[in-house]
Image: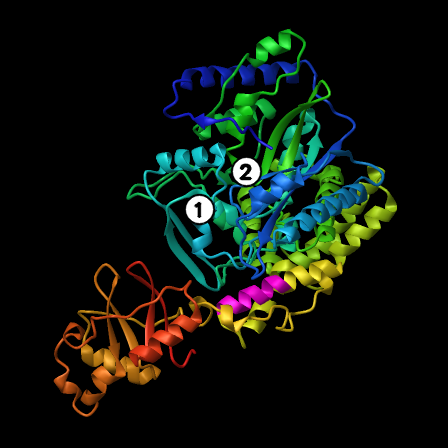
Amino acid sequence: MGELHVEALLKSPNNSNYIKQLLTDIEALDHMLKNDMFEKSPIRIGAEQEFCLVDQGWQPSNKALKILEEINDSHFTTEIALYNLEINLDPLPLTGFGFSKMHKQLDDLLEKAGDIATKHGDKIILTGILPTITQKHLELPYMTPIKRYIILNEAVKEMRKNDFELHIKGVDELNVHHDSVLYEGCNTSYQAHLQIDPDDFRDTYNWSQAIAGPLLSICTNAPMLMGRELWQETRIALFTQSVDTRASTFLLNEREARVNFGNDWAHGDIVDFYKESIVGFRSMLTTNFETDSLTELKAGTIPKLRALNLHNGTVYKWNRLCYGASKGKPHVRIENRYIPSGPTTADEIANMMFWVGIMQGRPKKYNEIHTKMDFKDVKTNFYNAARYGMATQFYWEGKLVSSQDLLLDLLLPMAFRGLYAMDVAPEDVERYLSIIENRIKSYNGSRWTVEAYRKLTKEHKQVDALAILTASMYQQNKKGYTIDAWQLPRGDEHIIQKEHAKVKQAMNTKTITAQENDSAELVLKMMQWKNIHHVPILDDDLNLVGLLTWTDVEQYLGETGALEQSIRDIMKTQLVTITEEEKLSSAKSIMQSRAINCLPVVNGKKLVGIITSKDL
């Protein structure tokens, strides 16, 4: 669950003490490894389930802390956004009915949270990125007011010295500036943990890297953000940029993002791996230390390596190496961070079982994979899978192979063998891996989401389509079907109450604008060509300063040569505007009382849309 009592390291008087603790942790880790102190059996699995909370209108809720307090269960903890919570599942031995037991516990805990959320007027959604998130939900009032998150936000901003930049290009494009790390809160994942033998660390970790792309391609479930189709797993790009401590400059930046896949194979042991992390990334957080890890070892206590874990907690590798200590034994595990939340718990357990099966079923021919595959091909595979999902072609053993062929012909049989070798119950293996097989032959969460959204936008405005999409996700999840059996939305899953409708539900966001120094004659032609009657006018800072209407220019239709003046000379500057959160009925009243047919929709001085009498 992470260290909660932290402070920023950069300006802390405890800076030197933290560094001593960090170096001592490395020494202690090396001592435990060389003296064969690590637990190697039984192998255990574990998981963390992140989920979203939405209100009656399927918009992000802000009630996470209230719901968490009433749940009163140590399995639950906060996330950075007030519309997210996390469940930490109990670790279980990798054998027998471990996966179905984990599934039952997950369902029970989600049901418990769902019942309490219902009392507060909320519902639980399992998805990689909640479709109804808007920029309003990424402002500081939606950040969980816990010191750890506030300090993390301040520390990242201090390192950047600039606002955050978010630029993701897929079918659509998202390009915005932001002033906090809260974009991280858009991402919800199902983080699977697999305990590993530290003596086989290099081959095991490198194998987890090699299979990441193919595994991700079948699990993608986050194709959209703010109504834009981006990557099939947009979380990969979004998380990378949302906590990036590097600001862009005119100089070439060779440093690696804190959220990363890595730049090379692992070549040493677990101590070398952590040393590389410390060299590559500055520590950001510290806490109070009562003793040090070497002193604890000498006293016969297995240390928690708190300084090292604090550092590791702010370096977000998609396959992250984690150290832990329980029941008097240290252990290491790989945390799979790239699998998204949802669409159902059965899909999530299947994803986890598929990953664990491939990890445990690695044939001998793939030992020392770092000598047989080029790391850049492996990294290419991962980012291609994030972009294209099941449409990806992978570089595998020198050949270009489709996602379906690689998964069905090589990795699925490998997973069966790996799970049987671990004495996982055959009923569990057949049940969950058949979910993966059915999905390979049909579609995954991201493809369903894209097709559903495209269908809905044929009859609904964007805001309403996103709400109906979210409602459909919830309802089909409740039916218990896995994603391969989901139907596309009918469109009536969420009934829009017109008396409560807001301006954002009817406004047009793809608005043609002009600038005040533009040619009036050209703008008139644009209005004719596009058959539009209202053009918002912006200044050089892209602030709204005027509105050009058809009434202003129609007199020039027969004598366009007379339009030699700039738009500034003929536009309306006494503007009546409205914000997107105001009621649609208010917009209608304003237009009727002012005898106007258009209202620019603004956020401060910035234009965010336009609403006309035709829209109403």
User: Residue 437 at x, y = what percent?
Assistant: 75, 57
Residue extending farthest right: 426
Disc 1 crowd, CA 10 A, few/some/many (<14, 14-19, 20+): few
Q: Is residue 95 above or below residue 439?
A: above
Asked which quadrant contains residue 507, the reply is bottom left
User: Which label lies toward us, 2 or 1?
Assistant: 1
User: Residue 515 at x, y = what percent?
Assistant: 23, 68
Q: Looking at this view, is 93 or 383 the one in front?
A: 93
Query: Is residue 528 visible from the viewing direction of this image?
Result: yes
**Which residue is tagged 1?**
141
The residue tagged with tag 1: helix, strand or loop? helix
Residue type beneath disc 1:
Pro
Q: Is residue 81 above or below residue 511?
A: above
User: Residue 381 at x, y = what percent?
Assistant: 57, 50
Query: Is residue 441 visible from the viewing direction of this image?
Result: no
State how the image is colored.
Answer: rainbow
**Which residue is tagged 2?**
317
Q: Are marks 2 and 1 in contact (CB under 8 Å)?
A: no
Residue extending farthest bottom: 558
**What residue is rendered at 74% in x and 49% in y?**
350
Magenta region includes residue 522? no
- Residue range corresponding to the magenta coloring: 462-471
Indicate which disc, 2 or 1, sits on the residue closer to the N terminus. Answer: 1
